[in-house]
Amino acid sequence: MDSTIVHFKGLEKSFEVSSILAQFTVFGKTITINWYGAIIAFGFLLAVLFGGRIAYKWKMSLDKMVDVLIYGTIAAIIGARLYYVFSKWDYYGKHLSEIPAIWNGGLAIYGGLIAGVVAAYVVCKVRRMNFFNLIDICCMSFLIGQGIGRWGNFANQEAFGTNTSMPWGMTSEKVVNYLISNKDFFERNNITVDPYDYVHPTFLYESIWCLLGFVLLYIVCRKARKFSGQIALCYGVWYGAERMVVEGLRTDSLYIAGTTIRTSQLLSAILMVTCLVALIILLRKYTLNPQPIDGVDFFLEEQLNAKDEENADETESEEFVEEFIEEISEKENNNGEDN
């Protein structure tokens, strides 16, 4: 098993951490199940179950939600990979065959979020769903998945930061080896780090922040939601603020080509400010002029279904009238021929 001993500054006890959950042989081929993938899958499952529950309460079509889930997930995986690949194009441009190899790592959260949201918007337009209600549900679900999924980074001993003297600072053989092997990268990007000192467990910071954010956003959704899309804006402010700060501590950031500007840090700042401004404006608007909320005060799905039934009845009536007129015309023509 691929394992390492992890030490925390404030604890006397050390922990053996393996990146491999299970390994077995089938028909002579070795199958490996990594903790990273298992943890991501678990977080994804809980996020889907929570989202499905809220969608059911808001009387959203679960059949349409499945469409969003399928296309959104596919788009998110592709987007997360492309975001990472383009950020490291100096390497992947010379190794094109490695671009599809997501099993070797290399997925960026922001790429996945952007592509997933775009796919969800398209599906909502085609399937006639309230996009803003959907994105509110998705953002609460994102926080569940992100909060749990970050522990996959702990299993891999990755996504950590620079040195710290705090009691929760950690180190391991994998951490030391990574810091030593990437010395040139750190020098190019003005990062100062001692490979043999304790480092920030930035995966832990993000995990706690996301799970706390889920609780807060769920309370806002239950007690203080004034318009569809409000939870998504709160997510942008909450997650953007955290990622903007924590990204500055990390040693594995993606950078804008030719600069020392961290891509995710810049995007986080833009996300936070944009969502905060929009949130303030819309909260003021809907506080002064309250409006019914789909899923709470009325249900768009029911209205659309009722309209479809009404249109179907009108179509049937029109077809009946047309058939009746044709039948009369045929009889008159036949009578004329007999005369």
Image (tube, rainbow, N blue to C red):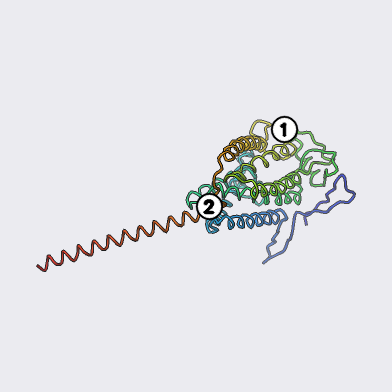
Labels 1 and 2: the sequence-earlier one: 1
> What amino acid type should be assigned to the residue bearing mark 2?
Phe
Where disc 2 sits, the SS reads loop
Residue where numbered disc 2 is placed: 298
Rendered location of residue 333, percent (x, y) = 16, 64
Rendered location of residue 107, percent (x, y) = 65, 46
Which of 294 and 213 lies nearest the eye of the viewer?
294
Contact (CB < 8 A) between labels 1 and 2? no
> What amino acid type should be assigned to the residue bearing mark 1?
Asn
Q: Residue furthest right?
A: 12
Rendered location of residue 191, percent (x, y) = 76, 33
Residue 111 marker: none
Rendered location of residue 169, percent (x, y) = 83, 43
| Eye-nearest disc, 1 or 2 | 2
Q: If the image is split into quadrants, where does the N terminus sit?
A: bottom right
Which of 13 and 51 lies nearest the eye of the viewer?
51
- Distance from label 1 to label 2 (Cα)? 53 Å
Residue 189 marker: 1
- Residue in the picture at 74% in, 47% down: 208
**Compared with residue 280, is residue 301 higher up or lower down, i.e. above or below?**
below
Which of 54 and 127 lies nearest the eye of the viewer?
54
User: Based on the displayed image, in which of its 4 quarters is residue 184 positioned?
Assistant: top right
- Residue in the picture at 76% in, 52% down: 155
- Residue in the picture at 64% in, 58% down: 49
Where disc 1 sits, the SS reads loop
Q: If the image is split into quadrants, where does the C terminus sit?
A: bottom left
Callout 2 crowding tier (Cα within 10 Å): few <14, some 14–19, many ≥20: few
Residue 122 left/right relative to 93: left
User: Based on the displayed image, in which of its 4 quarters is residue 270 positioned?
Assistant: top right
